[in-house]
Image: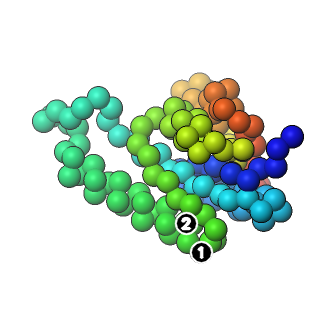
Amino acid sequence: MTIATKILVPTDLGDAAEHALDYALELARGTGGRVYLLHVVPLPAGGFSELGALSREAEARLLEAHQRAVNALAEPRGAVAMLVRRGDPRDAIPEAAEGLDADLIVIATHGRRAISRLLLGSVAESVVRTAPCPVLTVRPPKR
């Protein structure tokens, strides 16, 4: 068994993901590992058209805004490398884990059930099935 020295934490910038980040940071402290915080911006795929799709300039501004939000989440916690990617999180998270040669993915799960999971899908479930490394799912604390 390998010690998790590279821990990838995907975030949608919500409370559940923040809890998963804190959990991963505790793991990293215990192993001497490093945490990589990943935020995936869902943007239109397949080129740019004049109708409906973002211009390259608008896309750059959107990515910068997301980068600032990720920085605001990570900076107070320290010891976090920040990554912002674009695309479908179901694909981008396993790809980032493979590119980093991550030892572990720590991902929040929202605990959706039945119809909402059927309609919305589950990013965490997809990542568990396709990740190149072990995945730890973290439920948000009960309020």
Q: Quadrant of residue 141?
A: bottom right
Q: Quadrant of the N terminus?
A: top right
| Contact, mark 2 vs mark 1 (Cβ under 8 Å) | yes
Reply above or below: 91 against 63: above
**Could you say which is closer to the camera, residue 30 or residue 73?**
30
Would residue 48 be visible to someone looking at this image?
A: yes
Name the spot of residue 91 as percent of width and height, x first.
Answer: 51, 32
* Residue picked out by circle 2: 73
Report the amino acid beneath label 2.
Leu
Q: Which residue is at 50% across, 37% downward?
A: 92
Name the spot of residue 131 as percent of width and height, x first.
Answer: 65, 32
Reply above or below: 84 against 80: above
Toward the right, the furthest residue is: 1
- Disc 2 versus disc 1: distance between alpha carbons? 7 Å
Q: Which residue is at 32% across, 35% downward?
A: 44
Reply above or below: 122 against 83: above
User: Which element is circle 1 on?
Assistant: helix
**Could you say which is closer to the camera, residue 54 or residue 47?**
47
**Could you say which is closer to the camera, residue 129 or residue 99?**
99
Q: Which residue is at 35% across, 54% downward?
A: 63
* Residue picked out by circle 1: 76
Report the amino acid beneath label 1.
Pro
Q: Which residue is at 41% across, 43% downward?
A: 86
